[in-house]
Amino acid sequence: MDFNKLVRDCLRNRPEAQRQLYEHFAETMLGVCYRYTKSIRDAEDILQEGFVKVFFNLKQYRNQGELGAWIRRIMVTTALNYLKRNRNYRDQMYFPPEHLHPVINEDASTILQAKEIAELIRQLPPGYQTIFNLHAIEGYSHVEIGELLGITDGTSRSQYARARGLLISWMKNYPFDKKMENYGGK
Amino acid sequence: MAANEFEKNVRKEMDEFKLHPSDEVWTKIEESIRESKRKRRILFFILSSLIALSLGGYGIHNFSDNKPKLEAQHKLSENNRSNDKSNIDNTKSKEPIKGTITIKPNIPLENSRQTDKTLVFARQKGASQSPNKNDILTSTSKKNPVAKDQTTINADESKEKKEGITDHGTTTISSINHPRDIGDSVQKVIAKTEDKRLTSIDTTGSKLDPSTDTRSVQVVNKKKSDPVSRKIKWGINFSAGTSVITEDAFSFKSSYAAADRQYSVPGSSPGGGPATGGGGTGNPSTYYTYSQSQNEPAFAFKAGVHARKNISKRSSLSAGLGYSYLADRIKIGTNQSPAQSFSALWYYSGSPQKTHTDHFHFIELPLVYNWRVTNNADHFLSLNVGVAPSYLLSTNALVYDTTLGGIYYYNKDLITKFHFNFISGISYQFRNKKNLEFSFGPQFSFDVTKAFKSDLDKRKYILYTGIDARVFFERKKK
């Protein structure tokens, strides 16, 4: 697909081009949004908001870098804003200063499918979930995460280590046991 | 390494993770885009109108002021030349250079009412005498009540001598804070000649003697009397432009976005693919789904007669009776034989291949409020807003329906007869030598009544945009 032409057509406000761009990236981006939320409805809200931003800011994309990565970055930013804005998430996203937890070098061979991993990530408490997504999947450094979430990089590291440990233990005990399902994140 | 492996594996799995969003998401995105574009368009329209008005007002203001000023200067120069011939007594002043020169204006009787203000024209006399290096125009009525009907000129003659001003030096003062009419531009011109023997008196407030220490200065007041004529003016108007039926009220966009969506009727497949459905016959048959076509603007015009009455100096009301022809173009399929199961006598279906123009013939009663933006009463910009109830006389408009996979058909019962429009526009108005008034400018008419009673047709509100031209006739006085 010629993304340059597609972007040009979108900038000319051609509905069919906008639709094409959406259809090409919607599924992947919904996957991104899904990992940050607790419900598919919220994920779709973020997707919608993100794509509106994409179309309004498309002129800022100057064909530098991959279009998918650019859209993905917008989705992540939109998701973070959504979490901060939405009270259900905001109230649960607390980042207490914790002692550093060493990263467990356990071999958690991920024999799980993508969907299952995504579901496990979504079971994490919102704070862990966000930091894990940002660091492990999006590749943000802890310093960057600290800037994004307004926390110290130490807190980010600590939260990530906990999130990672939880995930690994859940993966080993997969399928879910009752204990994990009821995990409240407290 | 195990630590990195875990992240790698998770990242790899997550990159492949996809979920299919519901159709509702795209619909909402589309609506958001459309809404935002509409807002941007309205904002752009308002901003461009404001800029145009500002530029137009500025240009007209300047244009209207320059000419009279020059004329006035010419007149005054002539007057002053004649005044120069008379002897002006300057013996009272021992220091003529430092004094304030008091000049008694020759005010025409007809203007005397408006020139009860005194002007002081102080020219630079050096730092010791006047800190203000620029010419200052102030009212002297506070300082010197005696000088109420005088124009005082504080002149630096030595400077003039240096500069060698010898002939026809004229100074123009333009500003007047007339308490009665601040908004109107009043031009007063004081012509100062080369006469170096101007009568001078002390500036410290010594009593001025207008009979001896004055020279004539013509103060020409170019203020327009501009009385508010309460007479009703009659006129004719003609407007030509385009019209289109939009999906939203106060929108400039046709219903393309909605038309782009394929309509799914029960038993049919979206996207124009073959579907089964009986069209009410009970026997399943195969037909295609055709969405509503994109409608496009078409030529339209309005004509009528109207009457206008001033309600204040700057505003007027006009009402009239007019005919308006509005149209809208759509793409339709081929003409089909009458359907037994359908109320319409004939209809169009199939692949859209033919352009059809919906004609609408209205009679309307516009009532418009006009507000003059600029000062000049002879040529000015006017903002016009109003309403226009209208009645549909006849039409050949086709209505869209999703029956039988999407058809266009004629049904006059589904077309709204009474409409209500909001009118807005900007016009430039001017008067010719024969006292005929002309105005022209863009006009927008937003219909707020749904054109079709059927909700299946996405076209809803008729929008008209055009250039409106008007001529007003002045009744001859008997």
Image (cartoon, coloured by chain):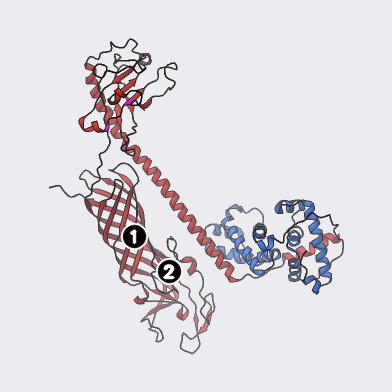
Chain colours: A blue, B red
Give me the disc on residue B459: 2
Query: Closer to us: mark 1 or mark 2?
Result: 1
Give me the disc on residue B387: 1
Q: Report x, y in % for residue B462.
A: 38, 65
* Chain bearing mark 2: B
In magenta stretch: residue B337: no
Question: Under tag 1, what secondary structure?
Answer: strand
Question: Under tag 2, what secondary structure?
Answer: loop
Residue B461 lies in quadrant: bottom left
Q: What stretch is highlighted in magenta?
A: B114-119
Residue B125 lies in quadrant: top left
Q: Report x, y in % for residue B190.
A: 30, 25
User: Is the C-beta separation of discs 1 and 2 under 8 Å?
Assistant: no
User: Where A176 sits versus B325, above or below?
Assistant: below
Q: What residue is shown at x 48% (from left), y 86% (from top)?
A: B278
Drawn side of residue A140 relative to residue B85, left or right = right
Q: What residue is shown at x 40% (from left), y 20% (from top)?
A: B124
Task: Name the kind of residue labelled 2 in the image.
Answer: Arg
User: Where B280 sits versus A77, above or below?
Assistant: below
Q: Report x, y in % for residue B194.
A: 30, 17
User: Where B470 sits versus B337, above or below?
Assistant: above
User: Where A68 sits versus B375, above or below?
Assistant: below
* Chain bearing mark 1: B
